[in-house]
Image (spheres, grey):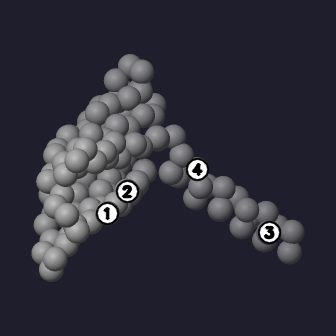
């Protein structure tokens, strides 16, 4: 029984560590009716990462998606800026910003921000 419990704890620790090592800031800010998105990522210098950014806007029965993706290499200090965008947000509309970082095929970090 002890071995099983230790094995379960080891698996949980590895799962938690899988997302460790990267700090992801979605960089979303609302200025009046303009949503500015300027994500940043930090981690081990020199890492090559793939990213996906989705900005979704909804309101009054309408919705729109703005999608961007690409690759980035973390600089010598271990940081990088991802693609930036600006989206108009009307009265009564809500927005969601989803940013995902991948190491190869593995999802390494994910952050979401929503607002009215």
Other-residue count near label 4 (Cα within 10 Å), few / some / many at <14 / 14–19 / ≥20:
few
SS category of the residue bearing label 1:
loop
Residue at image point 28% right, 48% down: 30
Q: Which mark is residue 5?
A: 3
**Residue nearest the observer in this picture, 3 or 61:** 61
Name the residue carrying label 2: 113
SS category of the residue bearing label 2:
strand
Say which quadrant the N terminus sits in.
bottom right
Is label 3 in contact with label 1 (beta carbons under 8 Å)? no
- State the image coordinates of residue 22 (x, y, percent, origin top left): 46, 41
**Sequence-first tag of 3 and 4:** 3
* Left or right of 42 on screen, residue 18: right
User: Of circles 3 and 2, which is in front?
Assistant: 2
- State the image coordinates of residue 67 (x, y, percent, origin top left): 16, 56
Name the residue carrying label 1: 116
Residue that protrudes farthest toward the top in the picture: 76
Residue at image point 78% right, 71% down: 4
Does residue 16 appear anywhere in the picture? yes
Mark 3 vs mark 2, CA separation in Å: 36 Å
């Amino acid at each position: 029984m002890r071995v099983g419990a230790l094995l379960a704890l080891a698996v949980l620790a590895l799962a938690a560590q899988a997302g460790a090592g990267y700090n992801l800031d979605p960089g979303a800010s609302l200025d009046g009716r303009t949503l500015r998105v300027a994500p940043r990522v930090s981690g081990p210098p020199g890492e090559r990462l793939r990213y996906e950014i989705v900005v979704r806007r909804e309101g009054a029965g309408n919705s729109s998606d703005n999608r961007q993706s690409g690759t980035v290499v973390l600089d010598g200090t271990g940081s990088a800026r991802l693609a930036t965008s600006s989206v108009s947000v009307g009265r009564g509309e809500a927005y969601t910003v989803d940013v995902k970082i991948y190491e190869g095929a593995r999802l390494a970090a994910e952050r979401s921000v929503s607002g009215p």
